[in-house]
Image (cartoon, rainbow, N blue to C red):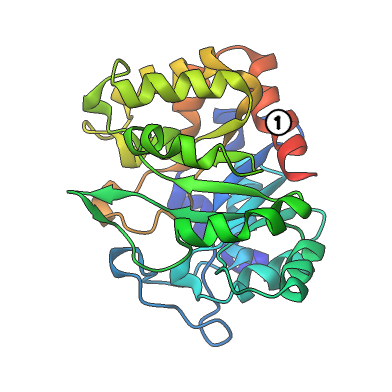
Amino acid sequence: MRDRYRAHRTEDRHVKKEEHMLPANSCDCHVHIYGPFDRFPPFSEGRFSPTRETPVEALFALWDSIGIARGVIVHALGAGPDNEVTLDALRRHPKKLRGIALVKADISDRRLDELTDAGFKGVRINLLRQDGKPVSSGGMSLDDLVALAPRLAERNWHAQLWIETGDLKELAPTLEKLPLTYVIDHMGRTMADKGVAYPGFRDFCERLRMGRYWCKLSGADRNTRTGTPFADTEPFMKALVAANPDRLVWGSDWPHVGHQPETVPTEADLLGLFHKCVPDEAVRKKILVDNPAELYGF
């Protein structure tokens, strides 16, 4: 079925392997899949609801076009609240994929073990706010995380947080009482016009140096104020690399749900930004290959 998507995805994303050569076993650590809808119906999640099917075969066609060998599916609420589409993909491609789940505190040990055996490595909690209000009211809550933390730690799972760095600074004392490692989405989701001197971002860079936190070099298209090629996000990515390259991974955030058609980024633009901010080949390999292998157990 992958061939069905290959020509469409390569042309659509304007990507060629030759543009930004990636090392062998490069990993895309942040993607979502949706559908096929006849098997895995979409779930309403406001502006983050999927408008078209983007199944795992379409993902693999894209990866083939840019030189990605493996990756991490972050289960999205818009793909359904039960993790089934991601579970199905992991079971069919155990060497190529890992997963991040959406769960609640009442999940059974049996179900946690089932997800663990399939290759899930953590949970995602959406704590992002806009204008003081949560972006999403669904999915996993902070209370769920606190209640689940011991059981997650037993299975060597981590907590992936979609949170702005200013809010993370406030929550850190609570989070650091839990026996968990944290992965922060989208460069800390700090809007670029706040600048790298923003106290929340500076605090996060310090925490990144401590080693308990990881960060995804993703989401430049969501943090930018100036648009493609996301030049205003360069100082943030460079600051994170300077803080601790051993705790960074890269992600495309494909298929970029929530964007307007005119703002959807191409993977060529995202990889171009990454190569510009990380010019050292050895550091790029660390972020694309070695760090994901450590964090996700490839």
Q: Label 1: which residue?
A: 291
Residue 134: give x, y in percent of width and height. Answer: 28, 57
Q: Is residue 109 visible?
A: yes
Residue 237: quarter of image: top left
| Quarter of the rendering occupied by the N terminus | bottom right
Of residue 13 and residue 165, the one placed in the foreground of this image is 165
Residue 286: give x, y in percent of width and height. Answer: 70, 23
Furthest residue toward bottom: 38
Q: Horizontally, is 230 left or right of 83 in the view?
A: left
> Looking at the image, is 67 positioned above or below residue 202?
below
Q: Horizontally, is 111 left or right of 261 in the view?
A: right
Q: Which residue occupies 36% across, 76% down?
A: 44
Q: What amino acid is found at the position of numbered circle 1 in the picture?
A: Asn
Residue 279: give x, y in percent of width and height. Answer: 55, 13
Residue 136: quarter of image: bottom left
How many numbered discs, if any? Answer: 1
Of residue 227 and residue 191, the one placed in the foreground of this image is 191
Q: Which residue occupies 76% across, 37% down?
A: 293
> Looking at the image, is 21 positioned above or below residue 95?
above
Label 1 packing within 10 angstroms: few (<14), some (14-19), many (20+): many
Q: Which residue occupies 47% across, 27% down?
A: 272
Quick one: SS at disc 1? Answer: helix
Q: Horizontally, is 292 left or right of 50 in the view?
A: right
Furthest residue toward left: 131
> Looking at the image, is 111 positioned above or below residue 67?
below
> Looking at the image, is 172 positioned above or below residue 121?
above
| Quarter of the rendering occupied by the C terminus | top right
Q: Which residue occupies 73% across, 44% down?
A: 296
Q: Is residue 269 visible?
A: no
